[in-house]
Image: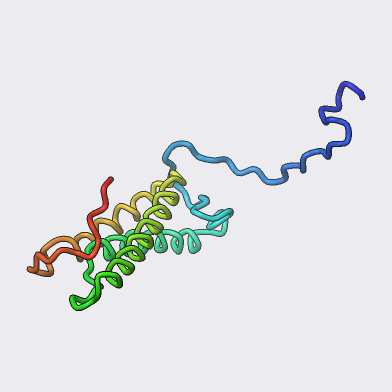
Amino acid sequence: MNSGDNNMPGMAAPPPMHHKMMMHMSFFWGTHAEILFRRWPGARGGGAYALALVFVFTLAFLIEWLSHSRLIKEDSSAAAAGLIRTLLHTVRIGLGYLVMLAVMSFNVGVFLVAVGGHCLGFFFFGSRFFKQSTAASDLPPLSC
């Protein structure tokens, strides 16, 4: 075994790294970001970046809609209502984790649209600006 060989005898060498993208560890502005998926939107340009921002905004908006909606009918059985609430909770938490992972790209635009989606969603569905009813939603509030 020569001194330049770092592999154990009989072990295959690790595959070479052809593509390395720098992972940002602080907030940055720019359209060259990876949000949720590998190389998406990446270097595809402003249109793909704008689509990614719309996607994150929509996810945050849907979380607020699910958090403040009444989707279970009053005459539903307890078992059916329980299953529906569990499904709605699962979807809401899954969407919340997706938004969290998108924000972890440390892109300022992604952060702003996530906050904006939550803000606008709460304004439409959680505030009393559009409805005077104080009826509780099907799901308990999200705790941060």
Residue most toward the bottom? Answer: 75
Residue most toward the top? Answer: 3
Q: In the image, is residue 98 above or below residue 13?
A: below
In percent of width and height, residue 54 lies at 40, 63
For the point 91% across and 23% down, the residue is 2
For the point 39% across and 54% down, the residue is 99
In percent of width and height, residue 130 lies at 13, 69
* Visible residue check, residue 120: no
Q: Quadrant of residue 73?
A: bottom left
Give the quadrant of the C terminus: top left
Q: Looking at the image, which is closer to me, 28 or 82? A: 82
In percent of width and height, residue 49 lies at 47, 58
Q: Quadrant of residue 80?
A: bottom left
Would you say 142 lies left or right of 42 here?
A: left
Q: Looking at the image, which is closer to me, 109 or 84? A: 84
Give the quadrant of the N terminus: top right
Q: In the image, is residue 106 above or below residue 71?
A: above
For the point 50% across and 54% down, the residue is 36
* Visible residue check, residue 23: yes
For the point 47% across and 36% down, the residue is 25
